[in-house]
């Protein structure tokens, strides 16, 4: 009962916070205090759920339109992992947003904080969805609720980006995701997630690859090419939106959903019975390399980071489709490791914008001497994304490489997996580390006039950067949750 109560509170608390925030527009300090308080309480609830994972959890049924279909929620380790990530980084982003929104003199700040809270409530519902129907409903709500955040600036560019955002995400889910759910229901007679999957014994393995193809392209929040264009388009949003919703909440809702399909709908063992499913790996492999190559050509910092995200998301998709315990473990861990690193990078991009009004990398030569904290923390995030030792991203990439080596399938495909991961790492080094290198070691014009961004921005940046280091030395919470989820073995 206590677990169910915490679950309800975790989903409703951000909504309650949104209502209160909406009434505090005339008092910015109170509005932001409510935002911080709501975020802190939401994270505390997620921590309490984590501590109570060993207790019995009941399914909370909200509605049951048909005997075999329900809108329901339940507490699982995977859900708790996602909830801890999203709520924890919401708190960090709220601190950062105070400095950014005020420092950049953004309009409609109350609306921004309200919609942010609504989006987090939706993420909590996705995290604890008990079945594919519930997941799909809130997956769509997340798209709609974040659209006003993407178009926050109200410019023609923002409206154009928002239109593409809405059309790709809504269109792909209706054309691909919904039919995949219907086929699953017709085959299995249920949509409720269960360990090992629900399709084994109910679907001819010949149809597994086409069905998974529908899921991969239908869950386009995972950012696989060619349905990735919504993500760079969403970079017209304010940096806090880009950071949390498009480096954590929205994109991670995509890979989270895809991993749930692999683990709890199709099932890794059943997927291995079809020789064709291994060739689905070509999709994330191509996305990893192509997106990295595109990132190298982008001078706008946020756009380069957006294409980096497209590439890094496909690491998670790759881990899921490897179907090996190490690959699934690496993909699950990369959800957290990538999120903490990428949010650091986006925060740094926003800090540069607030302090200097510069957005292009070519304009940042020498800025490292004027903003050493910002570019130092950017370097930490970049090192973690690359997977360099002493930074948390090393562990998820370690297991992804291990999973690729353990892959049993077409020999050419096996070699291609290893080459893809190695080449991608080299490309990561080039397009990420070149930024602080230019900032610190190249001379720039008149950089002495600039100073660091407001303190709130620096604090918001420092916390996830510190996590990038801390989670290298103590990744046990993430590792243990991911191991129980994927069935990976302890080392």
Image: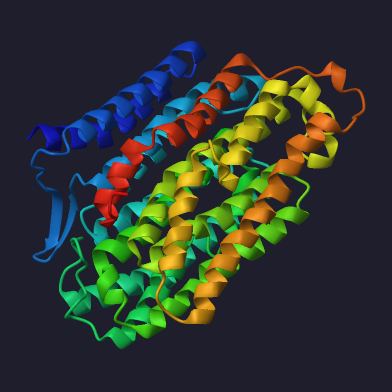
Left or right of residue 266, residue 370 in this image: right
- 169 left or right of 230 in image: left
The residue lying furthest to the right in this view is 445
- Seen in the picture, residue 274 relative to 191 is either above or below; the reply is below
Q: Is residue 192 visible?
A: yes
Q: In the depicted view, which residue is nearer to us: 325 or 237?
A: 325
Q: Is residue 20 left or right of residue 468?
A: left
- Rendering coords of residue 482 (x, y %): 31, 48
Q: Nearer the viewer, residue 58 or 443?
A: 443
Number of marks drawn: 0
Residue at position x 59%, y 49% in the image: 234
**Camera-nearest residue between 388 and 314:** 388
Residue at image location 56% in from the left, 73% down from the top: 416
Q: Residue at x 21, y 34 (%)?
A: 49
* Quadrant placement of the N terminus: top left
Q: Position of residue 443 (x, y in %)?
A: 90, 30
Q: Position of residue 267 (x, y in %)?
A: 26, 68
Q: Is residue 131 left or right of residue 388?
A: left
Looking at the picture, the colour scheme in use is rainbow
- Determine if residue 152 is in view: no
Residue 330 in the image: above or below residue 465:
below
Q: Where's residue 349, x and y in %?
A: 67, 34
Q: Residue at x 65, y 61 (%)?
A: 423
């Amino acid at each position: 009962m206590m677990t169910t109560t915490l679950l309800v509170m975790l989903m409703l608390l951000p909504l309650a916070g949104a209502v209160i925030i909406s009434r505090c527009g005339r008092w910015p300090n109170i509005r932001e205090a409510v935002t911080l308080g709501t975020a802190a309480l939401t994270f505390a609830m997620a921590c309490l759920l984590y501590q109570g994972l060993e207790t019995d959890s009941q399914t909370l049924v909200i509605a049951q339109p048909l005997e075999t279909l329900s809108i329901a929620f339940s507490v699982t380790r995977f859900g708790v992992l996602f909830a801890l990530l999203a709520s924890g980084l919401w708190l960090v982003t709220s601190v950062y947003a105070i400095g950014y929104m005020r420092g950049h003199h953004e309009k409609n700040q109350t609306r921004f904080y309200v919609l942010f809270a609504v989006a987090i409530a939706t993420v909590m519902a996705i995290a604890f969805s008990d079945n594919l129907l519930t997941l799909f409903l809130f997956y769509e709500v997340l798209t709609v609720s974040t659209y006003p955040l993407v178009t926050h600036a109200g410019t023609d560019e923002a409206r154009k980006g928002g239109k593409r955002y809405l059309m790709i995400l809504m269109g792909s889910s209706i054309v691909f995701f919904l039919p995949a759910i219907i086929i699953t229901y017709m085959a299995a007679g249920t949509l409720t997630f269960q360990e090992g999957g629900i399709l084994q014994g109910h679907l001819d393995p010949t149809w597994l690859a086409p069905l998974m193809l529908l899921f991969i392209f239908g869950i386009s929040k995972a950012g696989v090419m060619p349905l990735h264009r919504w993500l760079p388009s969403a970079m017209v949003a304010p940096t806090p939106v880009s950071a949390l919703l498009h480096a954590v909440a929205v994109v991670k809702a995509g890979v989270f959903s895809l991993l749930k399909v692999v683990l709890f709908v199709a099932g890794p063992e059943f997927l291995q019975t079809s020789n064709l499913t291994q060739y689905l790996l070509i999709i994330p492999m191509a996305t990893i390399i192509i997106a990295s190559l595109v990132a190298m050509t982008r001078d706008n910092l946020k756009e380069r980071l957006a294409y980096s995200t497209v590439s890094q998301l496909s690491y998670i998709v790759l881990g899921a489709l490897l179907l090996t315990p190490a690959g699934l473990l690496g993909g699950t861990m990369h959800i957290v490791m990538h999120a903490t690193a990428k949010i650091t990078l986006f925060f740094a991009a926003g800090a540069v914008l607030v302090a200097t009004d510069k957005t292009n990398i070519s304009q940042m030569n020498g800025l490292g001497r004027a903003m050493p904290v910002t570019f130092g923390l950017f370097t930490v995030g970049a090192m973690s994304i690359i997977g360099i030792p002493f930074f948390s991203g090393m562990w998820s990439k370690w297991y992804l490489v291990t999973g690729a080596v353990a892959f049993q399938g077409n020999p050419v495909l096996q070699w291609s997996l290893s080459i893809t991961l190695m080449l991608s790492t080299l490309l990561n080094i080039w397009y990420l580390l070149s930024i602080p290198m230019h900032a610190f070691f190249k001379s720039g014009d008149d950089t002495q006039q600039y100073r660091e961004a407001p303190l709130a921005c620096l604090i918001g940046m420092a916390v996830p950067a510190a996590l990038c280091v801390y989670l290298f030395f103590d990744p046990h919470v993430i590792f243990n949750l991911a191991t129980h989820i994927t069935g990976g073995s302890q080392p």
